[in-house]
Image (cartoon, grey):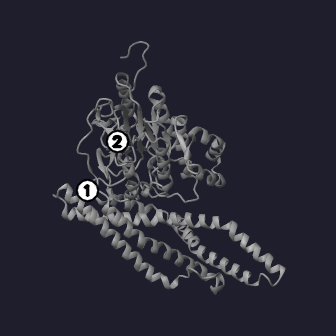
Amino acid sequence: MTHKGQPRQPTFAAILDPRLGDIEDDASSTKRRSMFSLAGSLLVEISLPKLVLAWILLLVLPGLLLGLVPIVVTSWLGAVASKIASAFIGIWSALIFLAVAALGWFGWRTVVRTVEKNFWALNSIVVQPGYAAAREILRHLTERAFAKHASEATRAKLRAAAAAVAGILVSVFAGFVLWLVWPSAHLFAQTSEIANWRDIVPVALANSVVVITAYLAVAALVWGIADAATPQPRGLTAFDEPQEGDRTWRAVHLSDIHIVGERYGFRIESGRSGPRGNDRLKRLFDKLEAIDANDRLDVILITGDMTDAGICTEWAQFFELLAEHPSLAERVLILPGNHDLNIIDRANPARMDLPTSPDRRLRQIRALSAMDAVQGERVNVVDLSAGKLGETLTAFLKPHADAMKRFADEARPLLSDALSVLWSKSFPVVLPPRREDGLGVILLNSNADTHFSFTNALGMVSAEQVRGIEIACAAYPGACWIVALHHHVIEYPWAAKALSERIGTALINGNWFIRKMRPLADRILLMHGHRHVDWIGECAELRIVSAPSPVMEATNDMPTAFYIHTLAIDGEGCLKLRRPERIVLEGEVSGADA
């Protein structure tokens, strides 16, 4: 019986409670299904015509362009030389000579850009991931065989040795391929020397393979030796103690909150092994409100994967969550994670995006729009050409707002090309310190371009973004910085349970990134998420903070946690990391759990 005026709340005693989900919610879960099982499903479901077309667009065409460039340049130089020889024969020869010379003079920049674009495209798709995979496979096998009960120092030596051996093996393999292909290549041939136009394609591809393998043969040795010489990561042995006169900041580090668009939705990776919906995140922000009221928080940093698949409904839920906490939202900073950009289809890991598809650009535009809404007036882009901090993100995006809206409505290819440059120029974004010797935050995009859900976790930091970090640090020589990115910069210093944990998740150029950041070690702190691992360590004097996920590793009834870090700058301008405060989110038994 219900009280008068109160609506009756119906209850349904279903055999299957839909709020608890079922096996269909585990379709893409790496917590519930093995990588072998997911790979089997992928092979059955994948579209072979789309796969072939994607490989042509991503590998064959860049390879053709890279291989054609030396032929074109050689032909142009030959034409110039012949015209020089006959330039004094007649006025027409002189005019033709000037036309050819002008074409080369004004076109060389385009040629250089074409070579650079296609070379680095192949480098990021094949070369560096190939070396990184060889290194991690060798490390994994070495640790499984020799380092199960070894000391941390012994494991570090084995990791270094594995990097060096991997570099040698990859270099030898590349040299062997170079030796096989060399007879078919004609790097400095002129087009007139190729008898049939049908021969241009294999010659160009052979030229491309020669360039790439020659580069890899040398680069792999350099990478292997450099990785072996770089100090290996280790757990942080001690935190800095408070000192009189230190200036301090309190930074909340969240990551991988994976907001879903449905009240009872499950997350891709965890399936039923993680909390349902977004209730835990709401309790997390309620707790932050209480903590902030007692002891003010300076920054709330979310290092990527705000959403589970980068779709509109998830971003809408994220904005609604922040709108309920306006005072906290003023201090939130976000950066893109692989789930915000690279998830092609929540339910089907076999689905691919063709390079011509607008979907990836759409996810980038959504992420840029979200970053603008959350922090656009507070952060600045970096003007690489001028070598200084530029305008705010909001001011930078404003001239492109109409194009962004049109693309979201129409997804026209011409708009996509223009907006791709906008995306790359938007990073890094910088929250400048409030005073010359204060604490700032630099936000990176560490996501590699990928068109395949099954390889969505690849990470890479571009040289342009590293240059942006250097510019920001030079603009405030007395300041210290949090450098935030999504991907972990280096594999953790312990043996992985499975090889799949080590392949395709860390930055493929992480060791290079660490070496570039090493000169700034006393002024910066690296903070990341991605693997949901609770770890604080150091590598090459750089302190690295890895954030756990508050929603990915436990069911509704189990606790999760996050950290509040206290950072300090001492009298000598060095950044100090004090012992963090671990905040536990208790599990909750709801009606659906009972």
* Residue nearer the viewer, 409 or 518: 518
In the rendering, which numbered label is found on residue 497? 1
In the picture, measured across the screen, residue 357 lies left or right of residue 348, that is right
Look at the image and tell me in which quarter the N terminus lies: top left
At a point 33% along the width and 46% down the height, the residue shown is: 544
Q: Hey, what amino acid is under mark 2?
A: Ser
Q: CA distance from mark 1 to mark 2?
A: 19 Å
At label 1, counting other C-alpha atoms closer than 10 Å, the crowd grade (few under 14, some 14-19, many 20 or more) is few
Look at the image and tell me in which quarter the C terminus lies: top left
At a point 44% along the width and 83% down the height, the residue shown is: 180
In the rendering, which numbered label is found on residue 96? none
Q: Earlier in the sequence, mark 1 or mark 2?
A: 1
| Residue 444: percent from left, percent from top | 46, 47
| Residue 64: percent from left, percent from top | 57, 72
In the picture, measured across the screen, residue 393 lies left or right of residue 126, that is right
Q: Answer yes or no: is residue 594 visible.
A: no
- Whether 498 is drawn above or below 329: the answer is below
| Residue 512: percent from left, percent from top | 40, 58
Name the residue furthest left. Answer: 149
Quarter-of-image position of residue 507? bottom left
At a point 22% along the width and 59% down the height, the residue shown is: 155
* Residue nearer the viewer, 189 or 93: 93
Looking at the rendered structure, the secondary structure element under dot 2 is: loop
Q: Hey, what amino acid is under mark 1?
A: Lys
Name the residue furthest top. Answer: 4
Quarter-of-image position of residue 174? bottom left
In the picture, measured across the screen, residue 260 lies left or right of residue 544, that is right
In the rendering, which numbered label is found on residue 549? 2
Name the residue furthest front. Answer: 572
Quarter-of-image position of residue 228? bottom left
| Residue 481: percent from left, percent from top | 41, 41
